Image: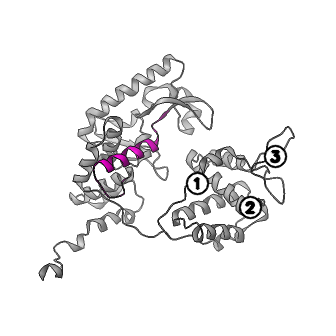
Amino acid sequence: MGSRRVQPELALAAGVGIGVGVGARASSVDPEQPADSTPRAPRLLDQVREALRLRHYSLRTEQVYADWIRRFILFHGKRHPLEMGAAEVEAFLTHLATERDVAASTQNQAKSALLFLYGQVLQQGLPWLGEVVTARAPRRLPVVLTPREVSALLQQLNGVSWLVASLLYGTGMRVLEGLRLRVKDIEFERREIVVREGKGNKDRVTVLPENLMGPLREQLVIAQRLHQQDLREGYGAVLLPHALALKNPQAALSWGWQWAFPSPSRSTDPRSGELRRHHLLEQTIQKQVSLAARRAGIEKPCTPHVLRHSFATHLLQAGYDIRTVQELLGHSNVKTTMIYTHVLNRGGRGVRSPLDQI
């Protein structure tokens, strides 16, 4: 497998519906079939979205799964998934690996989408599940910046981009965990940040850097002004977790549930159609970090996630035990955290290369 990635065409997935429902059998499915006044079963992709929302999958997962299912149907000449099975799934995944040269993780993402389609939407038994091969992702060492490089990178940022990047490095949060940070989950007195619904839908606690307490308080003042402006103009309701939205919808207006890094403008929620203020976009921070790395003369591939890798590596270098680092990162298995010990190259310390002795 190469290192290249295939990015799903999310815009197409959002606007295309498969024009045959689960209850209908047809020899082909037309992704471009327009809706008319004739009563019909819900379109297949609409059913996929409904099933994902019922199980509280994220919007990103919804978009990606719908796109992979659309691609699968188009790859097989618009045949209905009910008329296909293991052979067609295997052929599609093989095409992705051999002709599109996608990464193993991308291939497995497509497989997960198709298994969700057959198991949860079409309610088909999966006796052929074992026949579909799961691609093995190669073990790669993460890109890690040196402390000097981190400092140089942060010096090239300013404003909210600097604060978000500093927070990612100082806490080990993933970029979306940082951007989805709520006011109530910042514990200034205890110098902690509670990460809610992280990867695997798990909560955890990480450290709040003392150097960021002042700038973070200033950011919350800016965020509160935006929230008060929204309330005056008849808005101010933030997206809530599903259970809370049902039990206490008024919580959406409260200050504690607001985003710590709100977007400067309101936007329409793609699911509910409601106009509200979302948090900063992930792409915004990614672009700012990439440009800052270029200005700092850092030749390594540099993304916000590299700051998380650097956080873990630098903690281990400072002598913190691996279990502590595992908890701060939110890893379920310590083996995932142990990859950073390979970056440290502890086994090579004190070893002198024979070339240096010539």
The Cα–Cα distance between marks 1 and 2, rounded to whole angstroms, is: 25 Å
- Tell me which segment is drawn in magenta: 278-302
Residue 301: give x, y in percent of width and height: 36, 57
Q: Secondary structure at mark 1?
A: loop
Circles 1 and 3, Cβ within 8 Å, touching? The answer is no
Q: Nearer the viewer, residue 145 or 57?
A: 145
The one of 122 and 154 positioned closer to us in this rendering: 154
Say the numbered circle drawn on residue 309.
none
**Mark seen at residue 124:** 2
**Picture mark count:** 3
* Left or right side of 271 for 237: left
Magenta stretch contains residue 295: yes
Q: Nearer the viewer, mark 2 or mark 3?
A: 3
Q: Residue at x 38, y 43 (%)?
A: 288
Residue occupied by mark 1: 8
Mark 1 vs 3, N-terminal side: 1
Name the residue type under label 3.
Ala
* Residue 55 in magenta stretch: no
Splitting the image into 4 quarters, where does residue 100 fall? bottom right
Residue 231 vs 257, above or below: the answer is above
Name the residue located 18 percent from the left edge and 78 percent from the top edge.
353
Element under disc 3: loop
Q: Which mark is residue 41?
A: 3
| Left or right, residue 9 beside residue 146 | right
